[in-house]
Amino acid sequence: MRQAVFSSLGARVPGACFLDLFAGSGAYGLEALSRGAAGGVFVEKNAKAAACVRQNISAVCKSIGRADGEGLTLLQADALTVPLSQGAVPDLVFIDPPYEIIPTVATGLFMRLAELLAEKPEALVVFETPGEIELAPPGWTLRKRLGKGKGQPTVSFFSRST
């Protein structure tokens, strides 16, 4: 799925700034970094997962010949409450929350992102959900959806409605 996501993003990635919410292992942000993203912010609440992200950042930076952690920030914090304005306004926002909380957190996340991305209407939100969940946040337009099927990961691309 991640391959399909980044193939869809294509030329948007090189030079982009990203925000990776519910980072887990940091896979989305690290893939963006390995494809030429300028940098970004990882947000992960779980201490063990945050330590994993830290190790993965180091490994990816080493493999791409980048100074360890240059242009990257890891916040061990709750993605639902952390201030999202941690530096540059992102071009790409990756959201991969625990599936069971999506119905209760999606609307609030999109409201917070609408404020953060107000000055960058071309920014994309890439939101992973199980196939049975279809998001339709007010003020946002679904640009693309990858994956289908109950219980299968699905990724939806949203931009602010104009």
Image: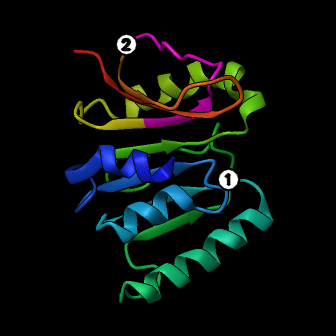
Quadrant where the C terminus sits is top left
Out of 51 and 28, give the one closest to the viewer.
28
Q: Magenta stretch: residue 134 in it?
A: yes
| Comes first in the chain, label 2 or label 1 | 1
- The answer to whether one can see residue 89 in this image is no
Amino acid at circle 2: Gly
The residue located at (72%, 33%) in the rendering is: 99
Q: Does residue 14 sit above or below 12 in this rendering?
A: below
- The residue depicted at 38 percent of the width and 71 percent of the height is 34
Mark carried by residue 137: none
Rendered residue at 67%/56% (across/down): 24
Label 2 vs label 1, nearer the camera: 2
Q: Nearer the viewer, residue 139 or 94?
A: 94
Amino acid on which the number 1 mark rests in the picture: Ala
In percent of width and height, residue 2 lies at 49, 51
Q: What element carries label 1?
A: loop
Q: Which mark is residue 77?
A: 1
- CB within 8 Å, label 2 to label 1: no
Q: In this view, does 72 lie to the left or right of 128?
A: left
Furthest toward the front, the residue is: 149
The reply, left or right, for residue 46 in relation to residue 43 is right
Locate residue 58, reporting x and y percent. 54, 83
Residue wearing tag 2: 139
Q: Which is more toward the observer, 112 or 48? A: 48
In the image, the segment drawn in magenta is: 126-139
Name the element at disc 2.
loop
Quarter residue 48 falls in: bottom right
Q: In the image, is residue 7 part of the stretch drawn in magenta?
A: no
Label 2, label 1: how many angstroms apart (C-alpha)? Answer: 27 Å
Q: In this view, does 14 lie to the left or right of 139?
A: left
